[in-house]
Amino acid sequence: MKKTAYLTKRILVAASKKEGVKAANEAMNIMGYIVTSEKGWVVKKYADGTVEKVKEIASTENLELILD
C-alpha cells in the first residue's frame, strides 16, 4: 500500500512561519532593517531595535471579495 503525504493547513502554516522568520533574519543581517506590518501599520524595524512607522494600513473590514 502506497503512503501519501498530505499537506495540511497546520503543516503549511508552520513551515511558512519558520521560513519567514529565517528570511527576515537574513534580510536584517544583510540590510540592517526589515519592512513588515504591525498593529495596523507598515513599519521599518532596524537591527538596533528602533521601529519607524511608514504608513497606516487602510481598513479592509468592509471590502467585498470578488473572484473572477
Image (cartoon, rainbow, N blue to C red):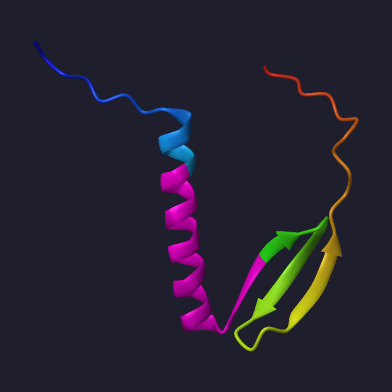
Q: Residue at x 48, y 72 (%)?
A: 25
Q: Residue furthest top?
A: 1
Q: Quadrant of residue 55?
A: bottom right
Left or right: where 1 falls relative to 16: left
Q: Main secondary structure of the magenta part?
A: helix
Q: Front-most of 3 and 64?
A: 3
Q: Quadrant of residue 3?
A: top left
Residue 41: % across, % down: 82, 61
Q: Front-most of 15 and 62?
A: 15
Instruction: Name the quadrant of the N terminus.
Output: top left
Residue 53: % across, % down: 82, 72
Q: Residue at x 47, y 30 (%)?
A: 9
Q: Is residue 22 magenta?
A: yes
Q: Residue at x 32, y 24 (%)?
A: 6
Total marks placed: 0
Q: Residue furthest bottom?
A: 48
Left or right: where 22 falls relative to 34: left
Height in image: 25 above or below 64?
Answer: below
Left or right: where 63 falls relative to 1: right
Q: Look at the image and give the residue range highlighted in magenta.
A: 14-35
Instruction: Name the quadrant of the C terminus.
Output: top right
Q: Is residue 53 magenta?
A: no
Left or right: where 9 falls relative to 58: left
Height in image: 6 above or below 53?
Answer: above
Height in image: 47 above or below 24?
Answer: below
Q: Residue at x 79, y 78 (%)?
A: 52
